[in-house]
Amino acid sequence: MKEYREIKRIINEVQDNIRDLFFSGFNSPHEVTVREFLRLSTILESVGMKYGALKLKNIVNEFNKKRHSFNFNYGRLTHEYCELNEYLSIISQKLQLMILKQKIT
C-alpha cells in the first residue's frame, strides 16, 4: 500500500504543476516550469508511467517550439495537456480504488 500512496503523491505533484500551468497560461512558461516538467517526467518514467512521462516531454517540446515562433499553434500543446490531465485522473482513480481494496482485505 505504501507504493500506491507514493505513486499517488507523485501524480498529485504532477497534477498540481499542470494545474498551475493552466492558471498561469500557456503563453509564457517560465524556465523553472520547463525544468520541473522534465524532472517530473523522469520520476514518472522511473515508476513505470511512461505515457505520462512522454506527455510531459511533449509539452516541454511544444514550449521549446513556441520560443522560436511568432505564429504558434496552441492546438498541439492543448491536446498534450488534456491527454496528460485525463491520464493522470484515470490513474489516480484506479490507485484510490486499489488502496481502498487493500484496506478492505
Image: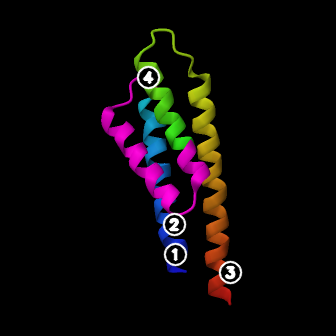
In three-dimensional space, the C-alpha distance between marks 3 and 2, rounded to whole angstroms, equals 16 Å
Q: Which mark is residue 15?
A: none
- Along the line of sight, which residue is nearer the eye, 71 or 101? 71
Q: Residues within 10 Å of mark 2 (few under 14, many from 20)?
A: some
Task: Specify start and end residues of the magenta stretch as a single range.
Answer: 26-54
Amino acid under disc 3: Lys
Residue at 45 percent across and 57 percent down: it is 43
Task: Give the labeled residue for mark 1.
Answer: 3
Task: Give the labeled residue for mark 4.
Answer: 27
Secondary element under disc 2, as helix, strand or loop, is helix
Task: Give the labeled residue for mark 2.
Answer: 7
Callouts 1 and 3 close, C-beta under 8 Å: no
Task: Give the labeled residue for mark 3.
Answer: 101
Q: Quadrant of the N terminus?
A: bottom right
Please, what is the dominant secondary structure of the magenta stretch? helix
Residue 57 on the magenta span: no
Residue at 51 percent across and 56 percent down: it is 45
From the top left corner, tell me how far across and down residue 29 is, in percent: 38, 29
Callouts 2 and 1 close, C-beta under 8 Å: yes
Amino acid under disc 4: Asn
Residue at 60 percent across and 61 percent down: it is 92
Indicate which disc, 3 or 2, sits on the residue closer to the N terminus. 2
